[in-house]
Amino acid sequence: MSRIKELFSRKKGRILNVYCTAGYPQLDSTLPVLKALQANGADMIELGMPYSDPLADGPVIQHSSTIAIANGMTIKKMFEQLKDFRQSPHRGIQGTFLSY
């Protein structure tokens, strides 16, 4: 069973899905932000990769993408930062699903 299906079968309502931008507010803050969201009740976290023309996104995500790019975030750096995320001790927090 996928983690999303497991989450929705375990929790019938009040599922907290949070979006954040990789590399925002600082280049190396992606993991601390993910861990803080998970520790404070996020059931699902959608991690956005910043790009130069986020026209379909609203002004808040556009702003965070602009700052993350200026910080030097790239796809390669994002995946390097995430490579051990699920093996970290914080993984024991019940059921958070990370989508990127």
Image: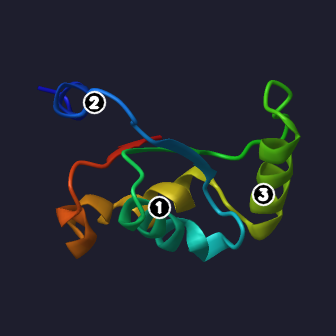
**SS at badge 1:** helix
Residue 68 rendering spot, x and y as whole percentages:
75, 60
Amino acid type, residue under disc 1 in the picture: Leu
Residue placed at 17% from the left, 31% from the top?
Answer: 6
User: What residue is at 29 percent from the left and 65 percent from the top?
Assistant: 84
- Mark 3 or 2: the one toward you: 2
Residue at (17% x, 33% y) in the render: 10
Q: Which residue is mark 3?
A: 69
Q: Answer with left or right where residue 75 lies relative to residue 45.
A: right
Vertical position of residue 88 compared to residue 83: above or below = below
Mark closest to the chain's N terminus, 3 or 1: 1
Q: What is the C-alpha distance between the residues marked 3 and 2?
A: 29 Å
Q: Which mark is residue 37?
A: 1
Q: Give the image location of residue 41, x and y in percent.
A: 39, 56
Name the one closer to the observer, 44 or 11: 11
The residue type indicated by label 2 comes to Ile
- Binning the other alpha carbons within 10 Å of mark 1 as few (below 14), some (14 to 19) or many (20 upward) gives some
Residue beneath disc 2: 4
- Residue 23: mark: none
